[in-house]
Every structure is written in structure tokens, then in C-alpha cells.
Image: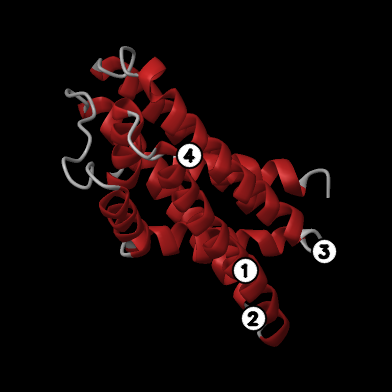
Amino acid sequence: MTAAFPAGFALGFSLILAIGAQNAFVLRQGLRRAHVFWVVLTCATSDAILITAGVAGFGWIVEAAPWITPVMTWGGAAFLTLYGALSFWRAARQSEALEAAETGAGSLRAALLTCLALTWLNPHVYLDTVVLLGSISTQYDPHAAAFGAGAVLASFTFFFTLGYGARLLAPLFARPAAWRVLDLIIGCVMWAIAAKLLLM
């Protein structure tokens, strides 16, 4: 159990670090101090629901079909390897600073609808939370719940830090070099987790 929780936190945090439309929107709301609490709470709660569904669902599936664990382990390792490679590719080609989305910055309703759309209509969210985290959690049975709890805490930690820390980070991440370093770190973490999966 002591290994499952930090492993879930590390993987959940690494996956969510990837720069995308959702994170750009949260960053923009944070920079403008517009509905920050409700936006970050919506993102983190959505992740918690999806992660819980993934961890709970894969436990039942594995009991019915034991062969799925090695298939998902190899699939997860392959995905993480590719994810890491893409992070290295972005680091090599990064030439512009992140620009946040231009929509949904007015009313609270508009902000939350935009946030929900960026979360629930993004197929990568399901791949990262339900499929990837759900499948990897089976490696930590009977402590899969602790793994999931670690991933959920990582989501809350990330979104609240990004939303409320945006103004502090803005000067740093206005420079392309900062994003290159971040992508290099993400790539290394992804490859390290993929290697650990294959060696378990």
C-alpha cells in the first residue's frame, strides 16, 4: 500500500502535466483570476470520477478475464513510451510560449461549460484516466484503491496549483525554454514508468 499511493500520484501527475487545451484554459482563468476555484474544482472532480471508474472497472474485468492484465500492461507501456517520445519531440521543436484559449472567460456559466467540454469531450482524458490508470492500478492489487487515491490527489494538487499559481508562473513560462525543460522532464518520467511496468 505504501508503494501504491505514491506510484498513483506520480503517474497521475505526470499524465496531467501534458500541455493541452484544458490546462491552457485553467492557466488563462488563473492569470485573469476569473472563477478560478470553480474551474479547478470542476477539472479535478471530473478526473476523480474518471479515475475511480477506471480503477473500479478494471478490477471486475480482470476477475472475469485474467488475460487482460498483461495485454493492458504492454499496451500501457507502449503508450507511455510513445507519450514520452512525443514530449521529447515537443521539447526539441518548441519555439513559442503557451497561449491560453480565448473562449469562456466571461460568466461563471460560460467558464464551467467550457471547462466541462474540454474535459469530457476530449478522448485523451478517457485514455489517460479510465484506460491507462485503470489498467496500471491492477498491478498494485490488493491496493489498487490506494493507487487511484494517489492519482486523484495528483489531479487536485495539479489543478489547484496551476489555477492559483498561474500569476506566479506567468513570467517564467512566457519563455519557450521553460516549456522545453518541462517537456524533457515529462518524457523522462514517462519512459521511467514504462520501464518499471515492463520489469514488474
**Cα separation between marks 2 and 3:** 15 Å
Classify residue 129 as left or right of residue 107.
right
Q: Is residue 19 visible?
A: no
Q: Position of residue 4 (x, y in %)?
A: 75, 49
**Cα separation between marks 2 and 4:** 30 Å
Hey, which quadrant is residue 27 in on the image?
top left
Task: Choose between 56 and 102: the one closer to the eye.
Answer: 102
Does 121 appear above or below 22? Answer: below
Q: Position of residue 15 (x, y in %)?
A: 47, 45
Q: Which residue is mark 3?
A: 142
Mark 4 is on which residue type? Phe
Mark 2 is on which residue type? Ile
In the rendered structure, find residue 61 and report the number of the disc placed on it: 2
Q: Which residue is mark 1?
A: 70
Whichever of labels 1 and 3 marks the residue nearer the N terminus, that label is: 1
Which label lies toward us, 2 or 1? 2
Which label lies toward us, 4 or 3? 4
